[in-house]
Amino acid sequence: MAHKLLSAASGKSGLSILIYHRVFDQPDPFLPDVPDITQFSWQMELLHHYYNVVSLEKAINLLQSGQLPARTACVTFDDGYADNFLHALPILQQWNIPATFFVASGFLNGGMMWNDRVLETIRHYRDNQLDLSAVGLGSYSLETNEQRKKTAADLLPAIKYLPPSQRNEVVQHLKQLVNHQLPVNLMMNTTQLKQLHSSGMEIGGHTLTHPILSSLTNEQAEQEIRSGRDQLSKLLDGARIRYFAYPNGKPGQDYTNEHAEIVKNLGFEAAVSTSWSTATSASDLFQLPRFTPWDADPLKFAIRLMKNTVLPYE
Ligand SMILES: [Zn+2]
């Protein structure tokens, strides 16, 4: 089993496209699976030394020409968090790693995605009891940090697949509950986005407001994808937004083949999902699979395995 995982992660059978969301300055007890600077740094160092890390553009060209070298990898980030610019960019530059950042443009400049609003509310709520019965989600004890973590773990999946209107109702309710200010700098601002782009990193589309596309009509989905792209392009002085990442990204659940068709018809050159696999020349360019190098996921497991048993590391 371990051998199989190691061989899959080594990229021999295809292109490994890594997914990241955030890189913290220090470990966050609420999000233990998210890498901090130290962890991200050794992961990039390892990639730099043992993989052929290329841009998405180059990887797609190599895939299409059937000339993909073994152990080829791409690095991608989803959503547009400010820590991508603050923490990840310097490390990527240190190891000369090109990355693609898929940005949900509607949250730039002070916005907050619903999952962060839930997390930050639980983190900052001063009461010991969070009563969400008004929006059909029950009441939660927040006396200890453990209870706060458990509440987050229970609430996030419960809210994730609510219909958009109902999810919005929950978000509005949370806004009313927390009187004092939640952080307004979680996502990138325009200056950070521009600097990320001008440093040579690729900026890709990730819709305007990060909806689960399959919960929308096709017209709404197209509008989300198109306006997200157009806003990014405008902020980047007309730069072409060539690639797209489906929000949540699970094929057949979060998006369908129809959405892949919409993305193609809008003029994107390729799109990525969150289906766990390596990409090959047989892969659909508009549904390229990716790895998630988080705890409990095979790639990370394999990286750790390589670090511990194959490579003289540390
Ligand atoms: Zn996302």
Image: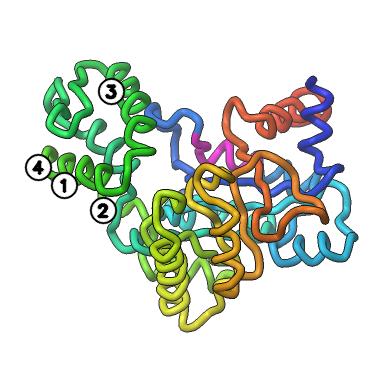
Q: Indicate which label's residue lies in the foreground, 3 or 1.
A: 3
Comes first in the chain, label 3 or label 4:
3
The three-letter code of the residue at mark 1 reads: Gln
Magenta residues span 34-43
The three-letter code of the residue at mark 4 reads: Asn
Residue density around tag 1, few if under 14, some if 14–19, many if 20 or more, within 10 Å:
few
Question: Which residue bears the numbered disc 3?
Answer: 148
- Can residue 3 be seen from the camera position used here? yes
Q: Are marks 1 and 4 in contact (CB under 8 Å)?
A: no
- Residue 224 percent coordinates (x, y): 41, 64
Residue 160 left/right relative to 275: left
Residue 75 left/right relative to 85: right
Screen quadrant of the C terminus: top right
- Residue 35 percent coordinates (x, y): 52, 37
Say if the magenta span includes residue 4: no
Question: Which residue bears the numbered disc 4?
Answer: 179
Q: Main secondary structure of the magenta part?
A: helix
Say if the magenta span includes residue 41: yes
- The residues bearing labels 2 and 1 have C-alpha atoms spaced at a distance of 8 Å
**What secondary structure is marked by label 4?**
loop
**What secondary structure is marked by label 3?**
helix
Indicate the colouring scheme: rainbow
Quadrant assignment, res 161: top left
Q: Residue at x 66, y 39 (%)?
A: 276
